[in-house]
Amino acid sequence: MPGGSGDASLAGSYFRIERKGDDFPFYRGAPVALTSAQWWLVMLGVAVGFAALIFPPPFLRGSVSNFVPAVLYCVLPLAALAFVSGGAWTAIFRPLRVRDGFWMVGFAILNIAITFVVGSIMIGVMETSANDAVGSAATQSGGALVLFLARTAIQLFGEEVMSILPFLAILYWLVARRSFSRKTAVIIATLLVAIIFAAAHLPTYDWNVPQTLMGVGVARIVLLLPYIITKNILVSTGAHIVNDWMMFAVSIFAAGASSADTG
């Protein structure tokens, strides 16, 4: 099994939610060992991919041309991983199972529920900023909406790449270089990735640090769990897409209902 490990030393080091016998790739040398320098090269790919997404040139900001930055956001980190690991880069993927669909929908619903609770708390104690992407979905229709959703799906896959590759790099550093236990390393890596992911979203929320850490950071932890359970980036991506598209649907429905009331 790609990235799996039958090492008896891992006995008792899995969390209850994980699929036993299938471990995270790379951090313990399976399917290939990566050095610190190689991990830094992968992180450079992640950073350059993110820069391509948020700083596109003017000619890549059209309704169709803006697919290019979204694709680069995904491809550049994966290309860096493929460069240092060869064909082993596919170890972050697994074949999809029927039950994976339930994980996608279940964690999307769970995240929306937690986001609602956290959001309600934040509104009561601080000033908050809206996510323009959710609001902009309500302004789209027809072919423009299809393009918007398609680009969003690609970008959300890129967000999973930007989260999971640093997660694996931190896991490597903590376990292989600092001799942390696997469980401790997974917890620390999850929290650090949540902080990194939240920091990347600061411009989206007008640099509101408390809101971004509480909202985006918590959501990142919830949506990373499908990967921790399945070791399959496609499952966490699916959960992320279902989550965001459900929020877009609510925004579109609300806008339509408002228009009907004022019409």
Image (tube, helix red, strand yellow):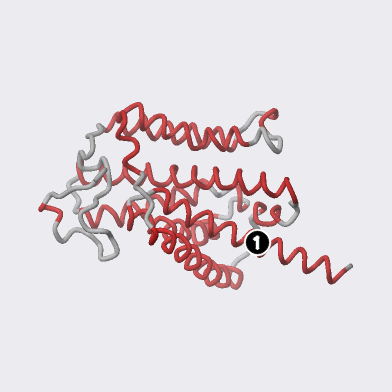
- Given residues 126 and 184, the one toward you in this image is 184
Residue for point 45% across, 66% down: 106
Residue for point 46% across, 51% down: 237
Quadrant of the rendered structure where residue 36 is?
top left
Residue for point 54% across, 35% down: 71
Establish if 182 lies above or below 116. Answer: above
Q: Residue furthest left?
A: 8
- Given residues 79 and 21, the one toward you in this image is 21
What residue does disc 1 label?
A: 249
Position of the C terminus by quadrant: bottom right
- Given residues 76 and 95, the one toward you in this image is 95
Determine whether, in the image, residue 107 is placed left or right of residue 71.
left
Establish if 117 lies above or below 93. Answer: below
Residue 108 point in image, percent of width and height: 49, 63
Under mark 1, the amino acid is Ala
- Given residues 209 and 156, the one toward you in this image is 156
Residue 72 point in image, percent of width and height: 53, 33
Quadrant of the rendered structure where residue 190 is?
bottom left
Residue 114 point in image, percent of width and height: 49, 69
Establish if 76 lies above or below 223. Answer: above
Q: Residue furthest right?
A: 263
The secondary element bearing badge 1 is classed as: helix
Q: Residues within 10 Å of mark 1 (few under 14, many from 20)?
A: some
In this rendering, the count of numbered labels is 1
Residue for point 76% across, 63% down: 255
Residue 254 point in image, percent of width and height: 72, 66
